[in-house]
Amino acid sequence: MSTAVVIEAPGEHRLTEHTPREPEAGEALVRVHAVGICGSDREVYQGNRPEGYVRYPLTPGHEWSGTVQAVGAGVPQALVGRKVVGEGFRNCQVCDRCHAGETTLCSAGYEETGFTQPGAMAATLTLPARLLHALPDDADLTAAALLEPAACIAAAAIKANALPGERVAVVGTGTLGMFAVQFLKAGSPAELLVVGTRGDREALSRQYGATDFRTKDQLLPDDFDVVIETAGSADAARTSASLLRRGGRLVLTGIPASGAQGLDPTDLVVRQLEVHTVFGAPPDAWAHTVRVFGAGLLDPLPLVTHELPLAEFPQAIELVGSGDPKVGKVLLRP
């Protein structure tokens, strides 16, 4: 029997029998290979995701990889059998933001796989085929399950626009931080500093291309060209801004708890800092990620520390929130 995880309401979940939904026109049916768990899945389970950004009951799972099993009318048959990943944001395709390629800003409102629409913690997932990105035939689908967080960081890297020879830094050493190191390294920086809270991430940071690693309580420079913040705390945002030279570029990707004390606007103006933010990944960032992954410039597998069956969803959620330094990316296998 194939199964799915359903979160009925905050704190309440069950395993249920899963029946694949046949694809309608414009849709594809994907057999799920692996699905990642991130902090936002934990929010969904605990009930502290912001109002309007979740709809119960819900099958979660927005980070996934799989293989196309069937397609509906109007979808190229050539997709059947292809390894794929998929965008989460369900955009309208007709508003001005969508036409500009900024689908995460779609003015029709927020809809996302695994939050307001059925997600991938099930044997199969049926979704609009236009959201799919095909992978090379020899792609490792376990590694590919991490391409959703990678795409969010690709969006940050595109906004940062770090040029070869610039001095760049990453604040935060989780999954997102380690992807940021890889994207920035691919752009040939003169220096690549990683700042974290834990020294045990130094080896992996250097493996991915960092030239220097410091914990946030050590003496930090103040003359970097570009900083990508991935830690999701107001403290990390302030640390990130302090690393920059005058006129430097800051990209914030983490989402601190609401009401957090932010950056000092006087400091931003006087130092003429350029500040960008990222929430989700538009299609160009996804395409860039898949291309970089296909070229062998992204190596997600070392980030995976646990793979569990779907039935162990509660244990997986516990692992993600444990704060244990030995827990990296947790994947579920339907």
Image: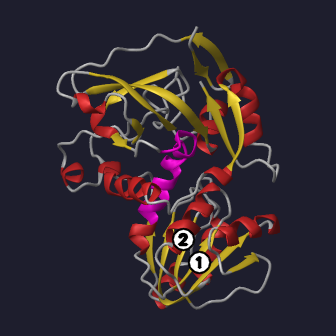
Q: Quadrant of the C terminus?
A: top right
Badge 1 amino acid:
Ala
| x and y percentages locating residue 85 in the rendered image | 43, 40
Q: Give the residue displayed 19% in from the left and 21% down from the top.
A: 73
For residue 261, side relative to residue 119 (left or right): right
Q: Are marks 1 and 2 in contact (CB under 8 Å)?
A: yes
N-terminal of the pair, mark 1 or mark 2, is: 1
Residue 197 to residue 175: above or below = below
Q: Secondary structure at mark 2?
A: strand
Residue at numbered disc 2: 228
Amino acid under disc 2: Ile
Instruction: Depth check: give the residue in front, 94 or 157.
Output: 157
Q: Could you classify mark 1 by the number of other residues whose Cα lies within 10 Å: few (under 14), some (14-19), or many (20 or more)? A: many
Q: Is residue 155 magenta?
A: yes
Q: What x and y, as percent, mark residue 280?
A: 44, 51
Q: Residues within 10 Å of mark 2 (few under 14, many from 20)?
A: many
Can you say which quadrant of the picture contains the N terminus? top right
SS for callout 1: strand
Q: Is residue 232 above or below residue 263?
A: above
> What is the quadrant of residue 194 in the picture?
bottom right
Prevalent SS, magenta region: helix
The image shows residue 273 at horizontal and vertical percentages of 46, 83
Residue lying furthest front: 138
Q: Would you name the residue on which mark 1 appears?
A: 169
Which residues make up the magenta segment?
139-156
Task: Report whether 214 appears left or right of 95.
Answer: right
- The colour scheme is secondary structure
